[in-house]
């Protein structure tokens, strides 16, 4: 048993699912934020529990060969990136091993896991930024929350965001300071500006700026819009969202367009998407294309198939599939997302899609009961994976192929084990790096009927 508040030396041997280093002292597991596999560290224990301890990194005795200097000065404070201090190739390697390890340990699935598909330039990839706004010593600050808290780390430039954000952040700060516009204080619940959200169309160059305010009246609105219009080429939309609730949720109910359109447009491949302030859209459009193309390839469509896209969100994958299939049924629990999916189908002139709103575990069996059977099933569930009722119905429908897109290797492993038991074989597993410098890993897996 380790003691609290004592100094220990250890080697980091693994990376946890939040990007924390994992090592052992006398067989006891110690988590160390900022530690990388291969590091020898001196740490002080801050927490000791029955099964594990948490150590604070005091000194790197011998650095891991995968350590690299993060380009971002606040990489260690900011909660946005977890592994920017790791060489990019090493990030890709460790994501691949994590998938393989989860499949083997949790699912007893021995599948070929391909090298992670990464980005040539793993920076400036995010098309959506959400900056909390605060005040420090009379100056406006904007950036990200510190790891595990709501303290704002002022971040004039974020390396994983589209570079235009630097300019937008500067202009908004200027506006706040020049016109003495108040900012929201989480403690007193007073002050106007809460968050600034930006969205960028990578193919179109269109830009949206959203001001989330505590109350409706936006002072010096004209001046703000002019400031943005004059300085941001590509500005298509300025939107105000009102959130006067005491909540951590960023958006409130009402959205008002202050300038231009209520949405921007972007493309993934040949498909066009309308993106509004509230609508969900994949945040890394370059890797989304890679992910969807992989999923489409695995679907192996010839043109006469009926396809189910379960957990379809705004129907992005559905539309990709619909280009090559006879009919695509999309199922999704969020009503607004299904509305977007229908609009997206329409603006792409797709007539072979049908979208259903509701719980997949209820809707999919219902569609099947009507006698509709899938030749190919695509699933892209949230972190908790698929409900058993969904997997059961898939097995009953007996499609030739199941393509599983997963954001959590642990639940992927569990679900693959189920499908494997019922006669599906994991042919190929392809991790795709959707979020460089973070601990997230996305995986596409092709299963075929034995
Ligand atoms: N395939 C989409 C989004 C996948 S994210 C894309 O590529 O953009 C997972 C989706 O599952 C989310 O949109 C979430 O709202 C939805 N979801 C979560 N639980 C669900 C359930 N029980 N039934 C149906 N959809 C669900």
Image (spheres, rainbow, N blue to C red):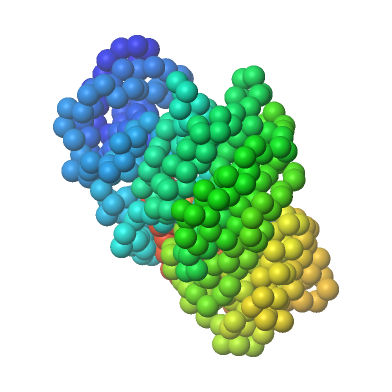
Residue at figure coordinates x 66%, y 39% from the top left: 218
When asked about the image quadrant of residue 215, the answer is top right
Question: In the image as oriented, which residue stretches furthest toward the left?
Answer: 62
Say how many tags the image has. 0
Q: Is residue 222 above or below residue 134?
A: below
Instruction: Specify whether 13 is left or right of 20.
Output: left
When asked about the image quadrant of residue 249, the answer is top right
Foreground of the two, 61 or 260: 260
Q: Position of residue 204 (x, y in %)?
A: 50, 68
Foreground of the two, 377 or 2: 377
Residue at figure coordinates x 69%, y 28% from the top left: 246
Foreground of the two, 384 or 258: 258
Q: Is residue 30 above or below residue 210?
A: above
Q: Is residue 155 above or below residue 311?
A: above
Q: Quadrant of the C terminus?
A: bottom right
Residue at figure coordinates x 76%, y 65% from the top left: 356
Note whether residue 306 is visible: no
Instruction: Specify whether 282 is left or right of 111.
Output: right
Q: Position of residue 108 (x, y in %)?
A: 46, 54
Instruction: Specify whether 435 is left or right of 338.
Output: left
Note whether residue 239 is visible: yes
Q: Quadrant of the N terminus?
A: top left
Residue at figure coordinates x 46%, y 32% from the top left: 141
Q: Position of residue 180 (x, y in %)?
A: 56, 29
Q: Position of residue 431 (x, y in %)?
A: 42, 60
């Amino acid at each position: 048993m380790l003691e609290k508040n004592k100094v220990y030396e250890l080697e980091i041997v693994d990376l946890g699912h939040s990007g924390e280093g994992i090592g052992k002292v006398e067989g006891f597991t110690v988590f160390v934020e900022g530690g990388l596999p291969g590091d020898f560290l001196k740490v002080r224990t801050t927490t000791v529990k029955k099964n594990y301890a948490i150590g604070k990194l005091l000194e790197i005795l011998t650095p891991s060969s995968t350590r690299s200097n993060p380009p971002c000065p606040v990489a260690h404070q900011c909660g946005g990136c977890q592994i920017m201090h790791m060489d990019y190739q090493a990030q890709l390697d460790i994501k691949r091993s994590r998938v393989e390890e989860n499949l083997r340990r949790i699912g007893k699935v021995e599948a070929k896991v391909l090298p992670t598909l990464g980005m040539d330039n793993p920076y400036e990839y995010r098309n959506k930024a959400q900056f909390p706004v605060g005040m420090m010593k009379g100056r406006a600050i904007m950036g990200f929350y510190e790891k595990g808290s709501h303290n704002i780390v002022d971040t004039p430039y974020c390396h994983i965001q589209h570079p235009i954000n630097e300019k937008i952040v500067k202009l908004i700060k200027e506006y706040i300071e020049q016109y003495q516009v108040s900012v929201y204080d989480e403690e007193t619940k007073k002050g106007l500006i809460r968050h600034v959200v930006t969205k960028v169309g990578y193919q179109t160059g269109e830009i949206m700026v959203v001001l989330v305010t505590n109350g409706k009246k936006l002072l010096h609105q004209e001046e703000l819009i002019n400031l943005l219009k004059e300085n941001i080429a590509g500005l298509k939309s300025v939107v105000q969202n009102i959130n006067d609730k005491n909540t951590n949720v960023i958006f409130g109910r009402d959205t008002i367009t202050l300038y231009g359109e209520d949405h921007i447009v972007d493309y993934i491949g040949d498909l066009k998407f309308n993106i509004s302030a509230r609508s969900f859209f994949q945040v890394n459009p370059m890797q989304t294309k890679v992910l969807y193309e992989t999923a489409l390839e695995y679907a192996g469509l010839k043109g006469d198939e009926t396809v189910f896209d379960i957990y379809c969100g705004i129907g992005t994958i559905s539309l990709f599939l619909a280009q090559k299939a006879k009919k695509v049924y999309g199922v999704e629990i969020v009503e607004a997302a299904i509305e977007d999916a229908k609009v997206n189908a329409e603006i792409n002139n797709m007539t072979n899609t049908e979208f259903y709103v509701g719980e997949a575990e209820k809707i999919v069996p219902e569609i099947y009961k009507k006698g509709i059977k899938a030749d190919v099933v695509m699933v892209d569930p949230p972190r908790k994976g698929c409900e058993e009722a969904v997997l059961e119905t898939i097995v009953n429908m007996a499609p030739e192929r199941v393509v599983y897109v997963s954001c959590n290797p642990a639940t992927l492993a569990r679900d693959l084990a189920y499908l494997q038991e019922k006669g599906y074989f994991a042919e190929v597993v392809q991790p795709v790096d959707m979020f460089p410098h973070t601990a997230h890993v996305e995986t596409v897996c092709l299963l075929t009927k034995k």
